[in-house]
Amino acid sequence: MKKILLAILLMPVLSFSQEKEVLKYFKSKDSLVGVKNQNGKIIVPAQFKIYSDLKDGDPVEGETILFDGEKKGEKPQKYAWGYIYDRKGNFLYTPFLYDNGPDYFVEGLRRFVKNGKIGFVDRNGKTVIEPKHDFVDHFTYGYASFCDGCKRNDEGGYIKVPGEKWGMMNTKGETVQPLTKYSDKDVKIVGKYYPYPFQYNEKEKNILQFFDKQNKLLADLYYVNQYNKIPEKEKRLYFEIVERPKENFSYYQVNTYDYTKNDLGMLYRFKFLVSEDAKKIYTIKSYNEQKVPFEEWLKNEIKEAEQYQKEHPDNPNKFKK
């Protein structure tokens, strides 16, 4: 899987920014990697051993610079991988080690490691949640579980330790207690209910309404190739805005969740971008973060669903255009 994800590991997720200075990776005679600008000025000296198939002259994409490897003469932090710099050459943070490489951006946030603790940064490298817990999971539907006093094994899992404490945090890093009384709108996580975490203004409600009006169509497209029959009530999808326009990112990101509030796909599956003026809608397509107009994506999804159904006429979850 690491080989498949090389492209995304060399750029922060969803790097759709305004025009910026051209930066390129370069390799020294001893194959260490650094970054120069278009005029040949060294922004970050060649001091990184990179394990991906990065080539001399490859462009730096996104709002930060990722060195996917080890820094010469420096012992890597435990459970960290790679180094992130800003486009001026200032060190920002070391990403959390996940899936044999730097952690992904999920719901607009990426985990990083500092002094053995885990926090979160945004796409611009700004610290959003200070590192204070021994372990924190990805955010999903606005929440992330964390643990203090837990012990990690060599396989990336966790060993139960007497006295360990688990909790749930929101995107502000605040600890959230489970509800004793809850409604259908609240979210169930590992058997406990937590408050519905999203709030929207009228403009944002209208954005989400666009997707919800097409709920059945999108659900049928998503479930057409599922092997087991899905009850209609369990096909309902939920759309939430997980990121708003900010510096270097002029979009609302809308993620899609199933009826249990689980993300349909951590990296890009059924994820959408809406322009700041809410007039243009795109989908996030493939590991290289290609931005595709919504209508073009929808047309292709319908075509693929019809083809799948033609080749598998016994599929239990029928797609009807």
Image (cartoon, rainbow, N blue to C red):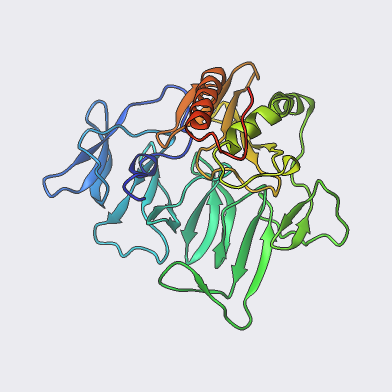
Is residue 248 among what the camera can see? no
Q: Nearer the viewer, residue 304 or 69?
A: 304
Q: Residue furthest top?
A: 279
Q: Position of residue 52 (x, y in %)?
A: 27, 47
Q: Residue at x 47, y 39 (%)?
A: 13
Is residue 95 among what the camera can see? yes
Q: Is 160 placed left or right of 5 in the picture?
A: right
Q: Nearer the viewer, residue 114 or 238?
A: 238
**Residue 300 higher or lower than 227, as above or below:** above
Q: How many marks?
A: 0
The quarter holding residue 313 reads top right
Q: Is 228 placed left or right of 64 in the picture?
A: right
Q: Residue furthest right?
A: 181
**Residue 178 higher or lower than 55, as above or below:** below
The C terminus sits in image quarter:
top right
Q: Nearer the viewer, residue 147 or 179?
A: 179
Q: Residue at x 78, y 30 (%)?
A: 201
Q: Position of residue 227 (x, y in %)?
A: 56, 46
Q: Position of residue 77 (x, y in %)?
A: 39, 64
Q: Residue at x 69, y 53 (%)?
A: 170
Q: Nearer the viewer, residue 172 or 271?
A: 271
Q: Residue furthest bottom?
A: 162
Q: Position of residue 151 (x, y in %)?
A: 51, 75
